[in-house]
Amino acid sequence: MTGTSSQSIFQVRLGWGGAGLEGLAAAPVVVIVDAIGTADDLVARAVALPHRPVVFAGSLRNATATAKAAYDVQIDSGDRTAINLVLVGDDGCFAVEDYLAAGAISDALTQLGIDHSAPDVAVAAEGFRALTRALTHLLSASASGLALAEAGRRADVKAAAALDAETEATRVDA
């Protein structure tokens, strides 16, 4: 992606999968967002980016802690810091649970004063705000949630919907 699709004019940006990771303008902070599951491949790709961003693994469970950690990077730098939210998705496709998690992280960033967000981020945040009370249902009814429940992992889905159950951000280093 180049030009406007890189979202370079915004402080908080949103992209999907590997294309989003590589297509968004370079940012000092990259948050790989995965509400249910593991994002090892995309996290490794983020850590290996040539500009060496600070990389966090974000979810609903650590949304506020992740936002605070990204904010702390900005404070430490002494300058406005761009943040790329990169959603893992389901095989690189839209996954409602990751979109809601990105919205939760964005909402927490806004409460910290980081709110110059791309329209994609604003839509995710507003969706999260409106649907916060339905997180458990939405995750369990999502394609990923249904697949995990079918595999006997319903408890994992319920745990993934526990907003801010973790108070520490997950920073990933090389």
Image (cartoon, rainbow, N blue to C red):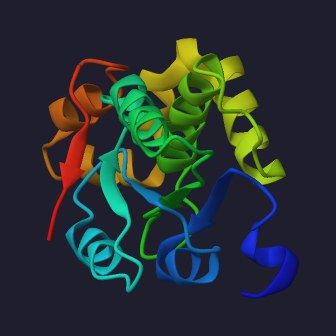
The residue lying furthest to the front in this view is: 78
Is residue 48 among the parts visible in the rendering? yes
Residue at (77%, 55%) from the top-left corner?
10
Residue 18 versus residue 90 in the image, above or below: below
Along the horizontal axis of the image, is 120 left or right of 71? right
Residue 133: image location, x then y, percent? 55, 12
Is residue 60 among the parts visible in the rendering? no
* Of the pair 108 and 130, the residue shown nearer to us: 108
Along the horizontal axis of the image, is 1 left or right of 108? right
Identify the image quadrant of residue 134: top right
* Of the pair 16 and 109, the residue shown nearer to us: 109
Residue 144: image location, x then y, percent? 38, 53
Give the quadrant of the N terminus.
bottom right
* Of the pair 59 and 73, the residue shown nearer to us: 73
Give the quadrant of the C terminus.
bottom left
Along the horizontal axis of the image, is 68 left or right of 45? right
Identify the image quadrant of residue 159: top left
Residue at (65%, 32%) from the top-left corner?
114
Residue 1 versus residue 94 in the image, above or below: below
Residue 84: image location, x then y, percent? 55, 58
Residue at (22%, 48%) from the top-left corner?
171
Residue 94: image location, x then y, percent? 58, 63
Identify the image quadrant of residue 58: top left
Residue at (51%, 34%) from the top-left corner?
105
Residue 80 versus residue 172 in the image, above or below: above
Tally of marks = 0
Residue 34 versus residue 107 in the image, above or below: below
